[in-house]
Amino acid sequence: MLVSPVDGATTNVDRPTLMWHGRLDAAGYLLDFDGTVQHAGDTTGYTTDILAVGTYTWTVAAYAAVGHTSAYTVTWSFTVNTQSPEIVAVAPANGASEVEITAPMVVTFSQPIEASTFALTSSPDPGGWSVSWDGGEMAATVTHTPFGYWWVCQLTVTAATDLLGNPLAAAPYAWSFTTGPYRIHLPWQ
């Protein structure tokens, strides 16, 4: 019976150890890893070579000293994902001008982010920061106390990791924009 990585798991470990329960009558085990059968010896674990990003299958059979081989277990699969998330869009855009002083900042990532790892700094810092995430945890909307008029604002995402713990690629990620002038909003506008 297979133990880990569990069927359908995703891991950021590129050399995972495959583990299974042993049998009392087993002299050793055959491991079918992604279609290639190999002797795993008399241990109940096997550490793979370095694996590329992708999905892999595995199953195990036990063999006795007298040559009898059991049926293979059910086949399990797991996915290796060591790709770091990237920032794919920011709003306001880098270099934008006349941005509303209350405009929220939106940072969109290439994959879901562990919200507790997201860190953003601002210079100057208006304070009052609050972050909310879209349902897929791929876009953070950051609200704040209003910026000042004609401020040149530099924002930096200093940290973020995906749900597997892969760190943000090209961190820190910085962009800037300029807030707009004071405007009088008339009732008919």
Image (cartoon, helix red, strand yellow):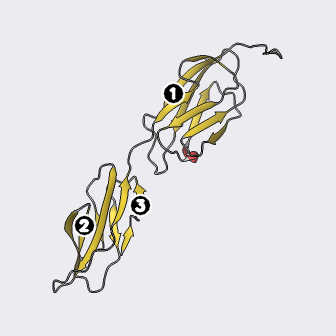
| Residue wearing tag 1 | 174
Residue 55 shown left or right of residue 113 in the figure: left
Report the amino acid beneath label 2.
Asp
Q: Position of residue 94 (x, y in %)?
A: 53, 22
* Residue 84 position (above or below residue 23): above
Report the amino acid beneath label 3.
Gly
* Nearer to us: label 1 or label 2: 2
Report the amino acid beneath label 1.
Ala
| Residue wearing tag 3 | 8
Residue 87 shown left or right of residue 53 in the figure: right
Q: What is the quadrant of residue 151 in the picture? A: top right
Give the number of the disc on residue 185. Answer: none
Q: Label 3, label 2: how many angstroms apart (C-alpha)?
A: 17 Å
User: How many marks can you see?
Assistant: 3
Q: Position of residue 139 (x, y in %)?
A: 56, 38
Tell me the crowding category of disc 2: few under 14, some 14 to 19, or many 20 or more residues within 10 angstroms, Cα based.
some
Q: Residue at x 70, y 13 (%)?
A: 181
Tell me the crowding category of disc 3: few under 14, some 14 to 19, or many 20 or more residues within 10 angstroms, Cα based.
few
Sequence-earlier tag: 1 or 2: 2
* Residue 75 position (above or below residue 51): below
Callouts 1 and 2 close, C-beta under 8 Å:
no
In which quadrant will I find the N terminus?
bottom left
Give the number of the disc on residue 32. Answer: 2
